[in-house]
Amino acid sequence: MKKISILGNGFAALTAVRKLRQLDTKCEITLIAPKKEFVYMPSLIWIPNGKRQATDLIVPLDNFCAKYNVNFHLAKVTGLKQAGRIIETTDGEVENDGLIIATGGRFIKKLAGIENVITPCEGIDSVIKFRDKVKNMDGGTIAIGFASNPKEKSAMRGGPMFEFLFGLDQQLRNEKRRNKFKLVFFCPAPKPGIRMGERAVEGILSRMKNCNIETHLGYKMKGFEGNKVKTEGGEFSADLILFMPGMTGNKWFNGADLPLSEGGMLKANKHCQVNGLDNVYVAGDSGSFAGPGWMPKQAHMADLQAEAAAKNLLDELQGKPIQATFKPELMCIIDSNNKGVFTLRTEKRQFVLPPLRVFHWAKVIFEKWYIRKLR
């Protein structure tokens, strides 16, 4: 019986489990993560307006592990030995015949004064902090922005920040206090969201203008102060700052003798196999994959990579040639609490559909379906 270890508890990790069990009912699967729970991150955007509570988005993994016959090792990964065959954790070592790394990325916290900002995708606690601060404000300036890894432009999370921005605008309007606030969107890129295509950028910037959201674009970040955003193009005051820095790889990558990209991610081929290592694969934000420059870091892409990684790992363990690949595909709904903009980009086509209520409800329905499937 082959022993397969999967590192992580997010979209890529759980999709890899399902795919492995679909293809092989007998292999021994061990899931390693610091918490035995899954957090549905895309719906963090609905916590500030009260449409979601933390408990709505946290899924204990006991039933999931029982359903798919998975061993759960509660620990943090600290390193690898013997080319991935031994995983070092805070609760001992775990041996395996095959490994899928899906531990996500790590936000780069090098800018001066970054302790003064809230980074929402760090988790539920950060979003609750943002929610409570907005609730207690009588007015003022709220700045929302994001940046990328300068050494790996695709290592970023821009989509959620557009959602927090437009969602906050709509929330304040619903609360009849939008006139008391100035919203400012900032980004080092002159065309934020360009990975979605030119039409998407035009639509996003036009919508900001229509919503009376000021912009500060195209200037390299210098840092923050308690109530100030500082860039090479100037600085501006803000009473509250929501900022998503670029992403890099996990800290333990550096001491694990793994091939890293310039941006600190695991270098992988089109089959999601980590370069130069047998029976070691990566899926999701941990990896640096060959593909178009617009290829996103998002849950949908992580799922596609995890399915390819799982199939290829089983084939490799059985001595078969690995052939599965994943399709680069950017698909998202930028939600604003009551409407959503649908964007799709592949290597052959791209289009953007205008804000419609149906896309908001499509996002809600998908969330409920996905969470129910895990519960």
Image: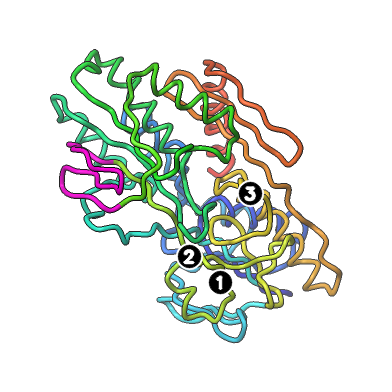
Residue 71 in view:
no
Residue found at x 28% / y 36%: 143
Q: In this view, does 177 lie above or below 184?
A: above
Query: In x, y percent, where is residue 372?
Result: 55, 37
Q: Amino acid type of disc 2?
A: Gly
- Residue range corresponding to the magenta coloring: 222-241
Q: Pick out the residue farthest to the front.
A: 233
> Label 2: which residue?
249
The relative height of residue 139 versus residue 124 in the rendered view (above or below) is: above
Find out whether the residues at labels 1 and 2 contact each other: C-beta distance under 8 Å: yes
Q: Position of residue 267 (x, y in %)?
A: 61, 67
Category of crowding for the residue at label 1, using alpha-carbon neighbours closer than 10 angstroms: few (below 14), some (14–19), many (at least 20): some
Return the residue nearer the eye: 188 or 176.
188
**In this figure, which residue is indicated by the disc labeled 3?**
303
Q: Does 114 sit left or right of 329 as displayed? A: left
Measure the alpha-carbon separation of dots 1 and 2.
Answer: 8 Å
Residue 25 location, quadrant: bottom right
Residue at image coords 74%, 75%: 1
Q: Nearer the viewer, residue 35 or 238?
A: 238
The disc, 1 or 3, on the residue closer to the chain's N-terminal end is 1
Q: Which mark is residue 321?
A: none
Tell which circle, 1 or 2, labels the residue nearer the N-terminal end: 2
Quarter location, residue 164 = top left
